[in-house]
Image: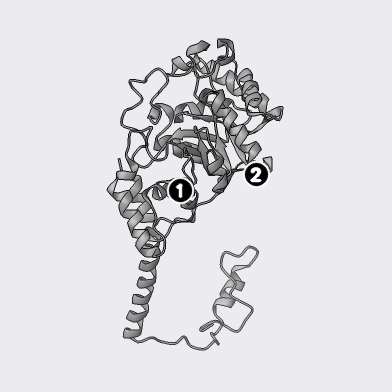
Amino acid sequence: LCGVPRSEGWVGRSEAGESRRLWRRQRQRRWRGPPCPTMSAPAVVAAAAGYVAVCLAAWLLGRSGAGPPPKRTVEIARGVHMPLLANGVDTDHHVWLEAGGRHLDTAFLYGDWKQRAVGAAIASSGLPRGDVFLTTKVMCCPTLRCGGVCEGGTTAPVAVNAATYRNVTAQLEHSLSVLGLPSVDLLLLHFPCARWADTAAAWRALERAHAAGHARAIGVSNFNASLLRRLVKIAAIQPAVNQVGFSIAGHPAEHGGENATRYGCLEGSRLYGADDATLRLATARGITTQAYSPLGAISNVDVLGRREVQRVAAAHSREGGARNWTAAQVAFAWLLQQGMGAVTATTDARHAAEALDAAELRLTRREMRSLSRLR
């Protein structure tokens, strides 16, 4: 180095154990290194301009460059890897599995016929059981704002006695029997109960189901930030997932959850955790957020009709050349690049392929911000 003395190094004033006399002696040594080169004024200006250009390019790349590639799976609990894209609600899941989908979502509330269809699709797929990730849900009754689903009897979605509706363990046993399986990969509490004590008791039942081997991971659905914060304080096992209604321009929905119908509870509102505050809390706690109704049906939002969504799809189609990206794929990619899962519902082979291919689409950071601002 230029200007460095040919010694074993400079002894700093702050080095422990060195005397002030040694410091002065080292300081008085003659410099024996080669002289530092001088730079002309134009060279200094050119070097500074180059440095500024590099910094500006890095800043622009950070603002508008391609975001991180979306993941296809996420580890929600130790050794439990959940495919981020799932198919739910429908009664025919063969198309989804044939298209390459490996996650099916169902629930006690959906009815025996739909859970039975999920079990039949897995059994007839020819796939090893371990290759298909299965989520089901049990209810917490009486539930918050959706009391009609907990009444039991012939008017309820599932024809079982009312006592089963109020017993989480009985619901799980019934669901496993209908599915024809000894366990599921993920068990969710579908809604919070109307009373916190009942919610806490239901969560303890899920923890017992996990300990008994009936579920590899457990989580919740439709929990807002306040309830989620309260749950993690008392949980022996932290929830792995919070499944909420979430979409572009629908986080939360404008309807706020009011005017709930008998069985349609207008999920997608802040009441059910479909807002950015709940997402931030879940992310901070290591809880994976999974979005149902990712195309906006629950939120009463026409995601596919939004001009900005269509513009982003068209821009990537022009860049890719041979590939035409759709508005639906942009909606899925927006979720996936945030580390969120998505539960769609389709029996159409083309739509299934579109959803699964969305993991290949990389939105820029600028596009992500633009889509996130839509309301």
Q: Circle 1: is it few (<14), some (14-19), or many (20+) Cα within 10 Å?
A: few
* Residue sitting nearer the eye, 311 or 1: 311
Q: Circle 2: is it few (<14), some (14-19), or many (20+) Cα within 10 Å?
A: few
Residue furthest to the right: 212
Residue 343, given in percent of the width and then of the height, sits at 49, 38
Looking at the image, is mark 1 or mark 2 earlier in the sequence?
Answer: 2
Residue 231 lies in quadrant: top right
> Three-letter amino acid code at disc 2?
Asp
Q: How many marks?
A: 2
The residue that disc 2 covers is 131
Instruction: Identify the element where label 2 is drawn.
Output: helix
Q: Is residue 188 visible?
A: no
Residue 33 lies in quadrant: bottom right
The quadrant of the picture occupied by the C terminus is top left
Which residue is depicted at the point 54% across and 31% down? 106
Q: Is residue 365 visible?
A: yes
Residue 59, given in percent of the width and then of the height, sits at 38, 63
Which residue is depicted at the point 63% across and 63% down? 16
* Residue sitting nearer the eye, 42 or 255: 255
Which residue is depicted at the point 44% across and 56% down? 362
* Residue sitting nearer the eye, 167 or 365: 167
Marking on residue 350? 1
> Three-letter amino acid code at disc 1?
Arg
Tag nearer the camera, 1 or 2? 1
Q: What whole-number distance in Å separates the C-alpha atoms at marks 1 and 2? A: 22 Å
Instruction: Please determine whether, in this image, residue 63 is positioned above or below residue 201.
Output: below
The quadrant of the picture occupied by the N terminus is bottom right
Instruction: Please determine whether, in this image, residue 284 is positioned above or below residue 54.
Output: above
